[in-house]
Amino acid sequence: QVQLAESGGRSVQAGDSLRLSCAASGRTDSTRAMGWFRQVLGKEREFLAAIAWNIDNTVYGDSVKGRFAISRDNFKNMVFLEMSSLKPEDTAVYYCAAVTQKTWGPWVTGRYGYDSWGQGTQVTVSS
């Protein structure tokens, strides 16, 4: 019931910063939380960050704490991922996700609790 579309992925150099965006449409009035994940071919999808829609809660994966920041714009129905100090190991397809029926809880750090996913945007970090 919520459709998501990521944008902003591109090729950058190590140490650069990059901002990813995710636009939500559909039943956005029922959104409870949104998250960012990434996946490399042959590996499991990795949790990066999540943010509650109407409360102050945020949570980050260990691999990106201190480097990535999630934020939202409720009026525009968008969520963002600000990435800094990018490393070659950050190269992946980045996905945003949303949930409409669950309240905030530990499940937001897992891959299987979300209702909707975007198609992904490629981030490539070189050197």
Image (spheres, grey):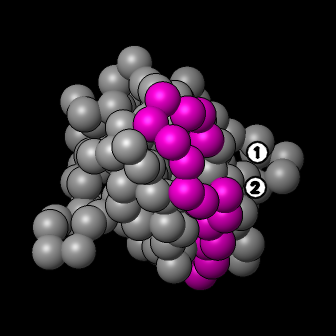
Task: Determine if residue 89 is in view.
Answer: yes
Q: Residues within 10 Å of mark 2 (few under 14, many from 20)?
A: some
Q: Are marks 2 and 1 in contact (CB under 8 Å)?
A: yes
Residue at point 51%, 52% (across, down): 34
Residue 102 in magenta stretch: no
Bounds of the magenta segment: 1-18
- In the shown orientation, is residue 127 left or right of residue 118? left
Residue at point 76%, 42% (across, down): 73
Residue 11 in magenta stretch: yes
Q: CA distance from mark 2 to mark 1?
A: 5 Å
* Residue occupying the far top of the picture: 66
- In the shown orientation, is residue 67 left or right of residue 28? left
Residue at point 16%, 65% (across, down): 44
Q: In the image, residue 88 lies at what x, y percent? A: 33, 45
Check disc 1 and report the residue beneath it: 74
Q: Residues within 10 Å of mark 1 (few under 14, many from 20)?
A: few
- In the shown orientation, is residue 84 left or right of residue 72? left
Check disc 2 and report the residue beneath it: 77
For residue 110, which quarter of the picture?
A: bottom left
* Residue occupying the far right of the picture: 75
Q: In the image, residue 120 lies at what x, y percent? A: 50, 72
Label 2 sits on a secondary structure element that is: loop
- In the shown orientation, is residue 56 left or right of residue 74? left
